[in-house]
Image (spheres, rainbow, N blue to C red):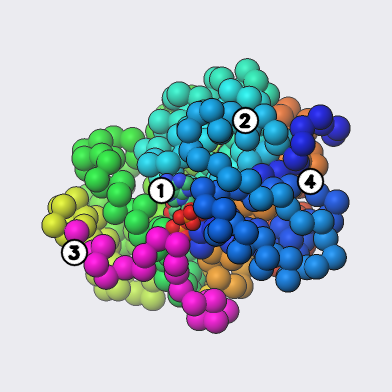
Amino acid sequence: MTSNRQYDLVLLGPTGYTGQFCAEHIVQNYPTDLKWAIAGRSIQKIETIAKELKALNPDRIDPDVLVVQLNPTELNELAQKTRLVINCVGPYHLYSTPVVEACAVNGTHYVDATGETPWIKLIIEKYHETAKANGAIMIPSTGVESAPADILAWALVKRVREDLSSPTRQINSTIKEMKSSGPSGGTLNTVLSIFDWLPLSEISKSMTPFSLSVSPPPTNIPRESILEKLLGVRAIRDLGTVTTSPSAIADITIVHRSSSLMPELYGQQFFFRQFLSVRNAMIGVALHIAFVVGISLLALPPVRWLARKFVFAPGTGPRREDSTNDRLEYHAVATADNADAQRVFGKITYGGGMYLFTGLLLAEAARVILDEEEKIKKVSRGGIVTPATLGQDFVDRLEKVGCNIETKVFKY
Ligand SMILES: NC(=O)c1ccc[n+]([C@@H]2O[C@H](COP(=O)([O-])OP(=O)(O)OC[C@H]3O[C@@H](n4cnc5c(N)ncnc54)[C@H](OP(=O)(O)O)[C@@H]3O)[C@@H](O)[C@H]2O)c1
């Protein structure tokens, strides 16, 4: 696609823990003729990053270095210069609403790594229609929350359509393994500041399973039993013993937005659930209780004040050498919406640090939008959409860079 904009891509926030991984992935994997820039608020910090990038791959064209403050004038100028913005400036609810506005108004494509569901709800309400009218494809949640869950669900639904000629009624998924060297300071600051931003009641209201969907939920979704609600733990056919997943609501709301944006693929009765695999029921109950108590404590300002004293500062995170053995593996089972309720198993795996993975997901999602702009506009219909709308092109790109996605139809 030809464009008269100066840049294909601007990476905003390359100085942060996630932004640096994303910049490195671009330098090491994108075509060398990419027209791009890195942008942030501090010239010294961005120039340091630019030098580090140069050392990684001296043979490619250097990115331009842009100093941008997060005000509407400077962000509008920035959005007009580029086809796409990758935004790593968080906490997103604190800083990134004007970035989304500038991209929506100027028809600039956009990806970010937020996991802040209430903020995603807010930007959808404010900017989805504007972005759509201006031809922008805007995809929040392209980090570990929620791209792996969303693209795995898409791959399963596609397999059900192709091999079983049916829409999908349900996907149960589980985080089989999440070996992580820990959250970055930016992530912890984001979690804590969400509770400063909104009272727990408001957070809960914006985090119902279909809160980001474009159409009402399907009818007859089976209810959880009181015991399941209280204890979290349960046994699921093909997935084993599972409990409450900390990323469930972020992932569920995104997958449901995907299904409501692409009902011709998923079907009208689709619903998705996510859990965390555990070795036995006792551990499952303990983790569920720890999660519920932890969230309730975070609602208390003195607890947040204390927590801030013990976490990494924003801009920092686990040492890279401590993340080399990190690993993520999600399993999921899709059930066809047909008389036989046939099932398809799926798995997504990645070996390496979770922030490296987020940087990779952002960069590869952006690449699909740049390379397949018209196709993605047609499938997603534009506006604020989801990683799953990038479809097979995203799956193919992820497989080239070490993220594996498999599906297989159960034969019994
Ligand atoms: N859900 C997921 O899967 C996932 C995964 C990874 C990251 N994330 C989210 O991504 C965000 C970034 O995480 P991180 O660990 O990379 O955080 P970080 O290291 O603290 O980086 C934050 C970035 O935002 C910039 N920034 C902060 N305040 C700014 C302001 N007022 N004006 C301009 N720029 C500003 C920083 O620039 P300076 O260097 O100039 O300070 C830095 O580039 C967080 O919200 C985190 O929760 C989510």
Q: Pointer 3: residues within 10 angstroms few (<14), some, or many (20+)?
A: few
Depth-wise, is mark 2 or mark 4 nearer the camera? Answer: 2
Q: Pointer 1: residues within 10 angstroms few (<14), some, or many (20+)?
A: many
Can you identify the residue that label 3 sits on?
306
Cα separation, mark 3 vs mark 4, equals: 45 Å
Report whether residue 259 is seen.
Answer: no
Q: Earlier in the sequence, mark 3 or mark 4?
A: 4
Ligand 1 neighbours mark 1 (CB distance < 8 Å): yes
Report whether residue 216 is seen.
Answer: yes
Cα separation, mark 3 vs mark 1, equals: 19 Å
Q: Quadrant of the N terminus?
A: top right
As helix, strand or loop, the secondary structure at mark 3 comes to: helix
Image height of 45 relative to 263, above or below:
below
Can you identify the residue that label 4 sits on?
35
Cα separation, mark 2 vs mark 1, equals: 22 Å
Disc 1 residue type (three-letter): Pro
